[in-house]
Image: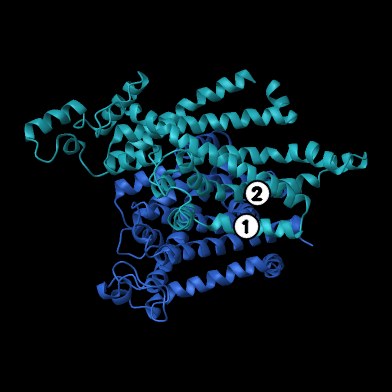
């Protein structure tokens, strides 16, 4: 019995992965993500943080891209390639951790609201509506301002402003499952609530949640870069892509390459997560199965 | 319907109360001293203390919050710590710029997103559909502020066609509008496409086709009208988001809008200014969402039937 259930579950994920593998854009996204992750993991091996990333070198100021400096150098003579490589570490970390936090907090709120319904649902949803009525950028800005700049505080700010949207998605995907007959059946068999939620509802509501998480990583990376860009996120000399663009603004009239590469890195990472998320959505969608 | 609208309008008040509490609490944690900002670094201790007492800064948090709400209910939102003028004076001087930006951006986004989305759905898997999908994917991933920088680089600094920053006539709105609208257009395009595809598979479309209606009638009269429902919600939400989310684009182009006002107010811990601006944006957001719901009822007879009961 246990074995059969395990087999069935395996085949479901196997199915989804097979579906995903046939999706070329999603695979491109996955490959880019893997490259980004490798780049972030081995950033220390690829470049020397103290020398290339934050070490100033006035004699090499504003060099155009060349064999020695692939992406050129910035106003302090720092190698832009090294900074962009190192920036992947910050952005990926931020994207993944904030999304995980949204998933846990938003997921819990959404699941409780969706499963219990009634008054609990109303209270949670009203609180989330209130949070949603505050423009997300301004809320994150105010939170960063009160906590102070830095990676950790930026992550807290982004997480809080994203929780409402996340909780809504999870609530609605739980709601579609809760009404199903097999949940009713499990309840009438006297299955405990915790077991129903963990074993029956969550696995079946998983699809939209995974898709939303993947897309949220991209959105959070962009949102954080935006905040750093206006000087309310990660402060220099840390090589965050958004704050690099902010520095580039001053000089781009003369050295346009400073404004190009960090932006490309940002767009590429957001694109890769969006492509994967899109592919996952198709793979989870039973209507797309052929 | 009228009853529903009144009920929804009344629901705005608890939301505003919640918003004011959250923002007030967050701002109270922010470092910085308004007294120093008003009087300057050199002010004598007695004068500082007197002003602190006048502004009520020595009171505990909840007292300060209740006093704020009490004043706000009398429509007294206080004065900006920085300019010493009523907060709405500066807000109303700057809000029109942001509103113009948001309106022009949402119009451009709809004009690009909806027709291309419909075309993509009608000609699914054609070359046009592929191009649209790729474009939408790329635009959704490109950060608006980077697009803004690149456009300044090309169109202002390179070709010298458009002003790079500030507001000096309508040409100043072109670049900011493009950088705000393209990501939104991408989202609307994708949503319109999927909503259209879903509608086209419905039974009533098959019935209409079976009755011999021409393709054009089927698409515009039946399919589009039904597919537009989810699209309208997203357009409304995006418009609300645009109003409060122009901050970064305003910074890129140095536009004196509400966004830059709020950022500066947040930076200098100008709590009354931040509160008033955020409350205004929240009211506008709630009203937009209400209008979206009403539009819903107007377009979809199934929804309006539910209200009339």
Figure quadrant of residue B108: top right
**A248 with respect to B127 (left or right):** left
Of all chains, the one bearing label 2 is: B
Query: Which secondary structure, mark 1?
Result: helix
Identify by letter the chain in cyan: B
Q: From the image, tell me which residue sits under label 1.
A: B135
Residue at image coords 92%, 42%:
B210
Q: Quadrant of the N terminus of chain A?
A: bottom right
Pointers 1 and 2 in contact (C-beta within 8 Å): yes
Judged from this view, the residue extending furthest toward the front is B160
Percent position (x, y) of residue B274? 34, 36
Residue at image coords 56%, 51%:
A194
First of labels 1, 2 by sequence position: 1
> Is residue B70 something one can see in this rendering?
yes
The one nearer the camera, B243 or A136, is: B243
Residue at image coords 84%, 38%:
B217
Height in image: A269 above or below B92? Answer: below
Give the colour in which the image draws chain A: blue
Residue B189 numbered mark, or none = 2
CA gap, disc 1 and disc 2: 10 Å
Tag 1 and tag 2 share a subunit: yes
The one nearer the camera, A220 or A15, is: A220
Query: Which secondary structure, mark 2?
Result: helix
**A34 with respect to B269 (left or right):** right
């Amino acid at each position: 019995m246990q074995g059969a259930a395990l087999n069935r579950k395996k085949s479901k994920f196997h199915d989804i992965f097979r579906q995903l593998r046939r999706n070329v854009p999603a695979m491109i996204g996955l490959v880019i993500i893997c490259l980004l992750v490798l780049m972030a993991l081995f950033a220390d091996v690829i470049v020397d943080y103290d020398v290339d990333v934050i070490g100033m070198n006035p004699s090499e100021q504003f060099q155009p891209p060349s064999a020695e400096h692939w992406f050129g150098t910035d106003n302090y003579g720092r190698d832009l390639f090294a900074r962009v490589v190192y920036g992947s570490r910050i952005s990926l970390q931020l994207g993944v951790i904030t999304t995980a936090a949204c998933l846990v907090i938003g997921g819990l709120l959404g699941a409780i609201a969706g499963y219990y319904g009634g008054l609990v649902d109303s209270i949670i949803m009203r609180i989330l509506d209130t949070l949603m009525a505050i423009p997300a950028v301004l809320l994150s800005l105010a939170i960063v301002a009160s906590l102070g700049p830095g990676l950790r505080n930026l992550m807290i700010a982004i997480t809080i402003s994203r929780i409402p949207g996340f909780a809504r998605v999870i609530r609605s995907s739980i709601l579609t499952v809760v009404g199903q007959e097999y949940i009713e059946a499990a309840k009438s068999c006297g299955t405990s609530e915790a077991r129903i939620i963990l074993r029956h509802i969550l696995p079946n509501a998983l699809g939209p949640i995974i898709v939303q998480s993947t897309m949220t990583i991209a959105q959070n990376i962009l949102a954080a870069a935006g905040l750093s860009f206006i000087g309310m996120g990660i402060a220099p000399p840390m090589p965050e892509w958004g704050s690099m663009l902010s520095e580039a603004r001053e000089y781009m009239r003369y050295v346009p390459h400073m404004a190009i590469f960090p932006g490309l890195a940002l767009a590429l990472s957001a694109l890769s997560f969006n492509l994967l998320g899109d592919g996952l959505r198709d793979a989870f969608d039973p209507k797309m199965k052929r | 319907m009228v009853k529903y609208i009144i009920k929804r309008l009344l629901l705005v008040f608890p939301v505003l109360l919640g918003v004011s509490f959250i923002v007030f609490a967050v701002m109270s944690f922010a470092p910085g001293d308004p007294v120093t900002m008003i009087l300057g670094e050199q002010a004598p201790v007695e004068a500082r203390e007197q002003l602190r007492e006048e502004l009520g800064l020595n009171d505990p948090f909840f007292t300060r919050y209740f006093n704020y709400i009490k004043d706000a209910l009398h429509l007294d939102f206080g004065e900006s710590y920085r300019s010493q003028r009523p907060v709405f004076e500066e807000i109303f001087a700057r809000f029109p710029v942001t509103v113009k930006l948001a309106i022009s951006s949402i119009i451009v986004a709809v004009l690009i997103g909806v027709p291309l989305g419909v075309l993509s759905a009608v000609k699914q898997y054609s070359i046009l559909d592929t191009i649209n999908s790729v474009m939408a994917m790329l635009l959704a991933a490109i950060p608006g502020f980077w697009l803004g920088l690149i456009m300044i680089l090309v169109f202002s600094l390179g070709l010298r066609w458009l002003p790079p920053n500030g507001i000096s006539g309508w040409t100043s709105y072109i670049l900011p509008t493009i950088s705000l609208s393209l990501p939104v257009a991408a989202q609307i395009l994708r949503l319109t496409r999927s909503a259209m595809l879903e509608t086209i598979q419905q039974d009533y479309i098959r019935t209409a086709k079976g009755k011999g209606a021409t393709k054009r009638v089927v698409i515009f009269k039946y399919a589009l009208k039904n597919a537009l429902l989810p699209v309208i919600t997203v357009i409304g939400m995006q418009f609300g988001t645009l109003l409060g989310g122009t901050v970064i684009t305003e910074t890129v182009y140095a536009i004196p809008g509400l966004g830059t006002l709020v950022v500066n107010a947040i930076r200098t811990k100008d709590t009354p200014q931040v509160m008033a601006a955020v409350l205004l944006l929240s009211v506008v957001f709630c009203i937009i969402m209400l209008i979206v719901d009403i539009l819903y009822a107007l377009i979809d007879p199934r929804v309006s039937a539910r209200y009339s009961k």
